[in-house]
């Protein structure tokens, strides 16, 4: 390893914490970019207009994927999992509900958290009314609140409108424990007029938003089954583009298809309709295995290709099943289904659309978020073709399964090295438009050829070089100037060996020197390979910015020589002595080997005996002060250190330097003093008086005098005990060559400390990083490496890669602004059918007009009402007016409470508008009670006004006013809730009640007739199928 030699003087004031080296203003630790899938994902969301996919994690991260391979990551204030995640489509707004019932509003364009709204109840359902800024929030008590998003300033407003539990279905629920609202689904073709409320106890209520009442009720106890099996609703979705069918999944594996009346089939003045039985029951095996149906999604298709996606899994994930069936308007007796072959349970799903330059045609991809955190993919068109072939009884082919993974080699990365050069960033400004993100492979391409790594063209200058060794023995060189890596050169293990049988041995150590064009690798079998790249014709000295020799090597097919030598144990560390050109390697079995690279020939191989029998952690060459002799420092896994002669490998001292309590060593570095200075180095005022050795372990950081280590003296120069378990360490240098120490902990905490003071300068966190030191759990998936300029790259298997910067610098990676542009303001949403139907708003009437309207009940009023109901769309202004009005007082739970407590009635002037929902005016009765209605209305107005005027007067005057008010108020309440007012004859009252009763019976008969017709059709289809089968058997 090449080591920069520094000359730093140390005094007591420095060691006491007063540093003249690395300063806080030199540091800006931050995540520059994240590529791939975040760890521990929990839920998915998709904006079909902007084509943005969001994946939330249990750590409070939200990863965004946009068009043309753009990516960005959002980080919540708290590391709390998401409960609900939804887009406000084509508005650049993402709403996240976390486990603390906090509603976060994210600005996607600015990638910032705009607002946090704390909801006081437990949120159990969350639905955004698309093409508006209204949100339905259901809670565990069975109520629904309405929120509105205000764009300027961006915040959520709690509207006055609410749907209390008792008003929606309180009388049908036996236990309040199951009163939670699980779904609030706006009805298709009437999204702004009707909302379907589904409770945990299986009660399904169709709510009229403008009418503020239940229009239809089904499910729950209305089944009338003698055997009451305990089950709860878990999933639901619409299964019809017109809002006439809804499919519900249950905890016991049942899947029911319920019929719901369309918007145009339910009149405002009708009483609440009910239904006794579901329309259809889907028998797919979930009930037999008692597998809860946790997710349902219905996708409308052309002709007969509408599909229902069904996901069932137990809480532990031991039993699971994901099926896709054809579900059209006309349900067939024979269910056409596809069982996807998943090896583990699926916790969420989404269908996205991708279209890149590599993949010219538009492709719909089914994404399945598996329990392990991996994302499985299927081409949705292949699923559709499979179902259609099954329908036609032809032999189908199962859809191909693919997984989302990074396109960085055929196997996982086992070791990596990073070299950066930010000395001249201006040289790259003209090339920043040469490689847009759309030229890189898409993470969500299902075809393997579309997921291959992008290649280096050789026309650009390299800022960062990333070298990776893989578990199959391959070694790859990448241009890391952009966070999307470009493959420069790939060296296959069999190419260097000439023996195909050796392919598949993981690479465990790498060393690369750009100036000498020398690459050295070691693998798990103990094989050391020395690669010497051939120089160009001009034989010039190479720099990092000119790596064409690697690219030309790749084009010419092996423009390098290879030498091999084998030692004992897996190679862990490699070091080169620049003076003697000797190579030293350390293995996991405790062997230290010194090799002459000219042969290559083995000079010395020494086994280090240790009480704990640990392997070699790291080895470093240095020079004895004043003598010029080469010294090899060996650091063991138990944090002990000793010195060998660099030429012979003999021990320089019989004793080792080791801590009192051994802990696993992570990193070792030599800082040479002034005697080993290099020409051109500037001696600072704080130059070192002697060479120092830095040793980092899981629990502490220690500095030793190099001369003491060589002599075997155990005295520490400086020591800091760490708070937490450190899992990785390295050093870096600022622009002024001031050294710093990076410590990464298992929790994701990152500490930056100064050297040699070891003072903590800055602390941050790498959220999403989850490392464990347990011996039973393998950590080989996490590969960390850093450059001398403070750039840290963390790879997690084939899932994700972090690019983390330490210093205050913004020019390390290209295209960061381009590949982070997720939201596009110029995209126009497609035509949305019913959403664009014009609505004619009715002008508001005065008090007198409302009273006359109630009295006359004219035909023109009925015509206007019918015309108004034919449109299922309300404008934004109309919805805002409805939701801004209190429809239920917060103190009263039900309307029945208002009617029973006449003494506590508070009649507002707005309540004088009498809505005749219960009865139609009858011509013979108009002359008999018009005067009475008019008198009652004006008595109510008079009573209300008098009450306000004499509130501060004597008690006797207040009683008179209350008496006058009471008569009108009672009449108004009776009228509003369908009871006849004072003055109506008993005969008329009986006739009216009889008429309403007959009307309800006719409606029930009509519903039963429709159900019987559907059952008859199903029976007829079964009979025809049975007859056809019998005839085939006879023939």
Image (tube, rainbow, N blue to C red):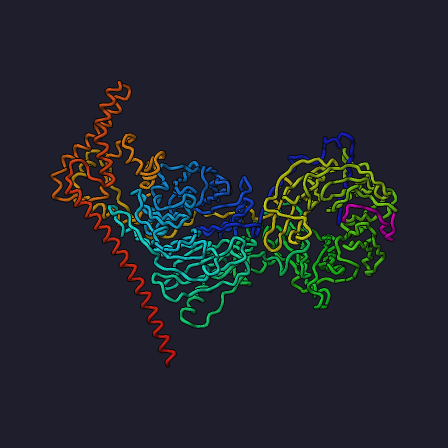
Q: Can residue 913 be seen? A: yes
Report the front residue among 123 and 867: 123
Please, which residue is most extreme toward the front here?
226
Residue 294 highlighted magenta (yes or no): no
Q: What's the residue at 56%, 55% (across, down)?
A: 374
In the displayed orientation, state which residue is furthest to the top.
Answer: 954
Give residue 9's position: percent from left, percent from top.
78, 34
Q: Which residue is drawn at 72% across and 64% down?
A: 496
User: Nearest the camera: 51 or 276?
Assistant: 276
Q: Residue at x 52, y 58 (%)?
A: 319
Seen from the viewer's position, the closer of residues 38 and 391 is 391
Left or right side of 279 for 527? right
Foreground residue among 609 and 175: 175
- Where is residue 878 drawn, in percent x and y? 31, 41
**Place of residue 967 in the rendered image (x, y in percent of width and height, measured from the top left):** 21, 30
**Left or right position of 227 against 699:** left
> Residue 779: x and y, percent?
66, 52
- Main SS category, magenta section: loop
For the record, the magenta segment spans 637-653
Q: Can residue 126 be seen in this view?
A: no
Q: How many labels does the image show?
A: 0
Image quadrant in which the C terminus is located: bottom left
């Amino acid at each position: 390893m090449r080591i920069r030699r520094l000359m730093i003087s140390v005094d007591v004031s420095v060691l006491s914490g007063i540093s003249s080296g690395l300063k806080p203003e030199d540091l800006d630790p931050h995540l520059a970019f994240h590529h791939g899938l975040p760890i521990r994902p929990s839920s998915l969301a998709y904006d079909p207009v902007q084509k943005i996919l969001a994946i939330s994690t249990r750590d409070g991260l939200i990863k965004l994927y946009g068009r043309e391979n753009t990516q960005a990551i959002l980080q919540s204030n708290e590391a709390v999992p998401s409960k609900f995640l939804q887009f406000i489509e084509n508005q650049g707004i993402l709403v996240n509900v976390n486990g603390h019932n906090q509603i976060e509003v994210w600005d996607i364009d600015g990638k910032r958290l705009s607002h946090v709204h704390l909801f006081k109840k437990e949120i159990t359902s969350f639905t955004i009314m698309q093409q508006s800024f209204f949100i339905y929030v259901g809670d565990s008590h069975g109520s629904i609140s309405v929120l509105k998003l205000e764009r300027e300033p961006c915040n959520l407003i709690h509207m006055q409108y609410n749907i209390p539990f008792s008003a929606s279905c309180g009388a049908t629920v036996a236990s309040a424990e199951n009163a939670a609202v699980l779904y609030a689904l706006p009805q298709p073709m009437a999204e702004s007029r009707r909302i379907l409320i589904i409770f945990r106890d299986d009660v399904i209520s169709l709510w009229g938003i403008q009418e503020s009442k239940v229009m239809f009720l089904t499910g729950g106890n209305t089944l009338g089954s003698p055997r009451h099996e305990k089950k709860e609703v878990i999933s639901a979705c619409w299964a019809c583009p017109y809002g006439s069918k809804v499919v519900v999944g249950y905890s016991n594996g049942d899947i029911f298809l319920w019929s719901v009346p369309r918007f145009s089939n339910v009149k405002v003045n009708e009483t609440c309709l009910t239904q006794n039985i579901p329309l259809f029951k889907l028998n797919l095996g979930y009930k037999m295995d008692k597998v809860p149906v946790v997710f349902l999604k219905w996708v409308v298709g052309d002709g007969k290709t509408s599909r229902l996606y069904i996901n069932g899994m137990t809480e532990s994930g031991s039993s699971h099943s994901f099926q896709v069936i054809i579900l059209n308007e006309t349900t067939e007796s024979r269910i056409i289904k596809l069982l996807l072959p998943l090896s583990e349970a699926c916790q969420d799903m989404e269908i996205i659309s991708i279209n890149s330059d590599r993949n010219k045609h538009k492709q719909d991809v089914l994404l399945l978020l598996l329990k392990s955190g991996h994302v499985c993919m299927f081409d949705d068109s292949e699923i559709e073709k499979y179902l259609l072939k099954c329908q036609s009884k032809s032999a189908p082919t199962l859809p191909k399964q693919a997984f989302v993974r990074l396109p960085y080699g055929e196997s996982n990365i086992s070791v990596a090295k990073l070299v950066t050069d930010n000395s001249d960033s201006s040289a790259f400004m003209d090339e920043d438009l040469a490689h847009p993100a759309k030229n890189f492979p898409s993470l969500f391409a299902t075809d393997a050829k579309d997921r291959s790594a992008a290649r280096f063209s050789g026309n650009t200058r390299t800022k960062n070089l990333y070298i990776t060794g893989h578990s199959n023995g391959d070694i790859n060189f990448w241009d890391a100037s952009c966070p999307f890596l470009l493959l420069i050169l790939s060296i296959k293990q069999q190419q260097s060996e000439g023996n195909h049988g050796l392919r598949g041995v993981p690479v465990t150590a790498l060393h690369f020197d750009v100036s000498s064009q020398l690459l050295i690798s070691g693998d798990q079998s103990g094989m050391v390979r020395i690669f010497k790249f051939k120089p160009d014709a001009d034989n010039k000295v190479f720099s990092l910015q000119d790596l064409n020799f690697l690219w030309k090597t790749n084009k010419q097919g092996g423009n390098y020589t290879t030498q091999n030598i084998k030692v004992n144990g897996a190679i862990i560390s490699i070091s080169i002595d620049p003076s003697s050109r000797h190579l030293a390697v350390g293995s996991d079995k405790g062997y230290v080997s010194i090799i002459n690279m000219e042969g290559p020939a083995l000079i010395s191989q020494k086994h280090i005996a240790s009480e704990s029998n640990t392997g070699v952690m790291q080895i470093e060459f240095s020079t004895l002060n004043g003598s010029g002799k080469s010294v090899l420092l060996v650091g063991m896994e138990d944090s002990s250190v000793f010195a060998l002669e660099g030429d012979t490998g003999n021990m320089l001292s019989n004793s080792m330097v080791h801590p009192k309590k051994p802990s696993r060593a992570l990193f070792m570095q030599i800082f040479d003093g002034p005697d080993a200075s290099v020409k051109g180095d500037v001696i600072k005022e704080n130059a070192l008086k002697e060479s120092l050795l830095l040793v980092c372990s899981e629990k502490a950081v220690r500095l030793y005098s190099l001369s003491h280590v060589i002599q075997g003296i155990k005295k520490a120069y400086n020591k800091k005990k760490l708070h937490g378990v450190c899992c990785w360490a390295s050093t870096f240098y600022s622009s002024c060559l001031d050294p710093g120490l990076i410590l990464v902990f298992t929790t994701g905490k990152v500490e930056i400390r100064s050297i040699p003071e070891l003072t903590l300068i800055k602390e941050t966190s790498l959220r999403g990083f989850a490392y464990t030191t347990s011996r039973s759990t393998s950590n080989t998936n996490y590969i960390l490496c850093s450059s001398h300029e403070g750039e840290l790259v963390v790879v997690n298997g084939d899932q994700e890669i972090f690019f983390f910067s330490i210093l205050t610098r913004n020019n390390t990676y290209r295209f960061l602004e381009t590949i982070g542009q997720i939201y596009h303001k110029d995209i126009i949403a497609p035509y949305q059918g019913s959403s664009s139907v014009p609505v004619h708003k009715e002008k508001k009437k005065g008090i007198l007009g409302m009273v006359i309207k109630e009295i006359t009940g004219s035909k023109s009023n009925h015509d206007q009402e019918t015309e108004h109901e034919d449109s299922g769309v309300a404008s934004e202004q109309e919805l805002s007016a409805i939701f801004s009005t209190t429809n239920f007082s917060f103190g009263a739970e039900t309307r029945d409470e208002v009617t029973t407590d006449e003494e506590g009635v508070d009649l507002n002037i707005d309540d004088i508008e009498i809505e005749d929902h219960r009865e139609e005016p009858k011509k013979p009765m108009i002359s008999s009670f018009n005067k009475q209605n008019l008198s009652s209305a004006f008595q109510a107005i008079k009573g209300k006004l008098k009450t306000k005027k004499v509130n501060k007067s004597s008690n006797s005057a207040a009683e008179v006013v209350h008496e006058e008010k009471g008569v009108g108020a009672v009449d108004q309440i009776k009228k509003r809730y369908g009871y006849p007012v004072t003055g109506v004859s008993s005969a008329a009252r009986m006739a009216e009640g009889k008429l309403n009763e007959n009307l309800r019976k006719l409606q029930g008969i009509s519903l039963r007739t429709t159900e019987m017709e559907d059952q008859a059709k199903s029976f007829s289809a079964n009979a025809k199928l049975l007859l056809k089968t019998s005839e085939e058997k006879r023939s």
